[in-house]
Image (cartoon, helix red, strand yellow):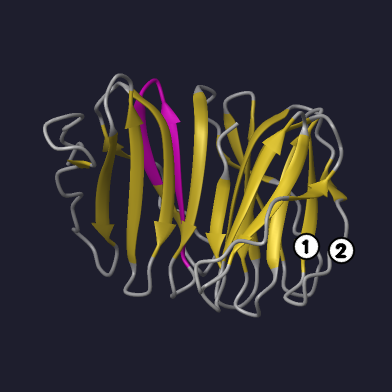
């Protein structure tokens, strides 16, 4: 399973990997040294993970096992809260997560091709999962937040990437085609301080490609995706 990583406010990089159904946590310090991988969840049946960092230095780890999602918290002091069941649906296949500046954790879960949205508020309470995209054919989901509190949701449907926004006021923009390539097999997303959202896609038989979208106003477009390997994997997102 691919690793998940998130950068902490102090510049450290947290990496979660899954081996034999167990989750491992590794830390690359800002000075370039590594802590070494240590078991963070010995469950044994974990099939998917997601990470999200908080401004206070805490790190949220979401795990999927047996179709259920659990939440674990690594505090800034290095201690762990321990995994706690957060969604016992029983049919969850994928999870994505991102935090907003106010400390809320947004969690996206994929259930039978549909995306559900949940919030763990900064006070530790949960909103409860609500249907966010009932497409029914979604195979992947990624999440990113921007400094204004908006949540960006990227979904993969039959090789095409769709982009949705949950605004800070709780309303949704609705999913719009962002990359009509048709051959995308995986995706990831991250928000940056100026409001841009970076989306990385994997196209079968090609190298990873990159697209960015400025989100600081209406009418913004997705620029041409650029390959990470010159001459390979180049494609143009849908405008």
Q: Taking 198 as reference, is 158 above or below it?
A: above
Query: Local crowd at mark 2 within 10 Å, few (<14), some, or many (≥20)?
Result: few
Residue placed most toward the observer, 167 or 64: 64
Residue 102 relative to residue 235: left or right: right
Determine which quarter of the picture holds residue 2. Answer: top right
Magenta stretch mostly in which secondary structure? strand
Residue placed most toward the observer, 228 or 107: 228
Tags 2 and 1 in contact by the CB under 8 Å rule? yes
At x 19%, y 42%, the residue is 225
Q: Quadrant of the C terminus?
A: top left
Q: Which residue is mark 1?
A: 73
Q: Taking 127 as reference, is 16 above or below it?
A: above
Q: Taking 156 as reference, is 50 above or below it?
A: below
Q: Which residues are magenta?
A: 150-163
Mark 1 secondary-structure assignment: strand
Spot occupied by residue 17 in the image (x, y as percentages of width and height) = 65, 42
The tag earlier along the polypeptide, 2 or 1, is 1
Q: Point out the residue furthest to the left here.
A: 231
Q: Taking 6 as reference, is 168 above or below it?
A: below
Query: Local crowd at mark 1 within 10 Å, few (<14), some, or many (≥20)?
Result: many
Mark 2 secondary-structure assignment: loop
Spot occupied by residue 139 in the image (x, y as percentages of width and height) = 51, 26
Q: Which mark is residue 81?
A: 2
Determine which quarter of the picture holds residue 53. Answer: bottom right
How far, Cα to Cα, is label 2 from label 1?
A: 5 Å
Q: Which mark is residue 162?
A: none
Q: Quadrant of the N terminus?
A: top right
At x 26%, y 53%, the residue is 212
Spot occupied by residue 63 in the image (x, y as percentages of width and height) = 74, 43
Residue 42 relative to residue 231: left or right: right
Please check the rendered image and state whether residue 153 is part of the magenta-colored stretch, yes or no.
Answer: yes
């Amino acid at each position: 399973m691919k690793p998940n990583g998130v950068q902490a406010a102090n510049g450290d990089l947290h990496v979660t990997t899954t081996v034999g159904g167990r989750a491992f946590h590794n830390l690359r310090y800002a000075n370039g040294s590594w802590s070494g991988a240590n078991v963070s969840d010995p469950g044994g049946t974990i099939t998917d993970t997601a990470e999200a960092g908080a401004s206070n230095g805490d790190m949220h780890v979401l795990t999927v096992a047996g179709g259920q999602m659990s939440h674990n918290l690594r505090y800034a002091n290095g201690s762990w809260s321990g995994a706690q069941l957060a969604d016992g649906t029983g049919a969850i296949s994928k999870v994505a997560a991102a935090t907003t500046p106010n400390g809320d954790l947004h969690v996206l879960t994929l259930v039978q091709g549909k995306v559900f949205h949940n919030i763990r508020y900064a006070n530790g309470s949960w909103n409860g999962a609500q249907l966010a995209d009932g497409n029914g054919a979604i195979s992947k989901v990624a999440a990113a937040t921007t400094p204004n509190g908006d949540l960006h949701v990227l979904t993969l449907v039959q090789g095409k990437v769709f982009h949705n926004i949950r605004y800070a006021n709780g309303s949704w923009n609705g999913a719009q085609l962002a990359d009509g390539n048709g051959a995308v097999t995986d995706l990831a997303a991250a928000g940056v301080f100026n409001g841009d959202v970076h989306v990385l896609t994997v196209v079968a038989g090609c190298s990873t490609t990159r697209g960015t979208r400025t989100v600081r106003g209406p009418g913004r477009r997705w620029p041409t995706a650029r390959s990470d390997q010159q001459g390979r994997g180049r494609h143009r997102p849908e405008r």
